[in-house]
Image: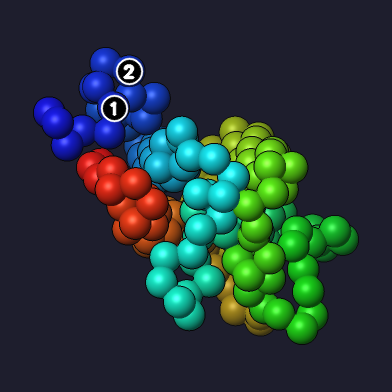
Amino acid sequence: MSDMWTEPASDPRPTGTSVGELATLRQYLTFHRLTLRMKCEGLDAEQLARRSVPPSTLSLLGLVRHLAVVEQYWFHHVLRGLPVEDPLYADDDDPDFELTSATGDAAMVEDSFAMWQREIDAADAWLDTLAPGDLDATVTRRDEELPVRDVLVHLVEEYARHVGHADLLRECIDGRTGE
């Protein structure tokens, strides 16, 4: 078990078989959110902001900030149909501002994780209102009708892809690999 990130008994991520499609999608989303958090644990602000290889702008902190934006956009704007009056990390001149502006400042790290958690909490509160049949409802994004199910699958995929990036970023920082 030397390649395990954490001992199975203390792993905070959900496991087991979920009952129903909505529960399964939520379990996968929660699993990937917690995996990213675990990949960031034990690192200082400079390490969290360290970019992998130039010219890449990816860093673990940048991923946390990016996924806060993703949570806000998809859960607040697309799924709930509400305007995003205070978009996170927005800059009209830099579409990747949440990534490029991530620095090794301790206050920025604390703020970024707090904002990410705030968006996760808001998303989970909205998900708590769904019934299984609501997965067939549609929402509009850029004049396209999308089933709620497809949006949730997209979010699981988005997290899974970025958790893969986090694996490589963490390995570059301190050599730690594993789940």
Q: Report the residue marked by disc 1.
A: 6
Crowding around mark 2 (Cα neighbors within 10 Å: few <14, some 14 to 19, many 20+) is few
Q: Which mark is residue 178?
A: none
Q: Report the residue marked by disc 2.
A: 10
Amino acid type shown at disc 1: Thr
88 vs 35: above or below: below
- Secondary structure state at the residue bearing disc 2: helix
Left or right, residue 52 beside residue 44:
left
Amino acid type shown at disc 2: Ser
Residue pushed farthest left?
Answer: 1
Q: Quadrant of the N terminus?
A: top left
Toward which corner of the image does residue 31 lie, by quadrant? Answer: top left
Left or right, residue 144 beside residue 132:
right
Q: Quadrant of the C terminus?
A: top left
- Assess whether mark 1 and mark 2 are in contact (beta carbons under 8 angstroms): yes
Toward which corner of the image does residue 81 lie, by quadrant? Answer: bottom right
Residue pushed farthest top?
Answer: 9
Between 12 and 54, the residue placed more toward the observer is 54
Please state the horizontal and vertical placement of residue 2, each as a whole percent of the image: 14, 31
Between 144 and 43, the residue placed more toward the observer is 43
Q: Residue at x 60, y 79 (%)?
A: 144
Between 117 and 176, the residue placed more toward the observer is 176
Answer whether residue 34 is visible to the viewer in this image.
no
Q: Residue at x 49, y 53 (%)?
A: 60
Q: Residue at x 27, y 33 (%)?
A: 5
Please state the horizontal and vertical placement of residue 34, each as a whole percent of the image: 44, 37
52 vs 142: above or below: above
Left or right, residue 97 beside residue 8:
right
Q: Residue at x 28, y 43 (%)?
A: 176
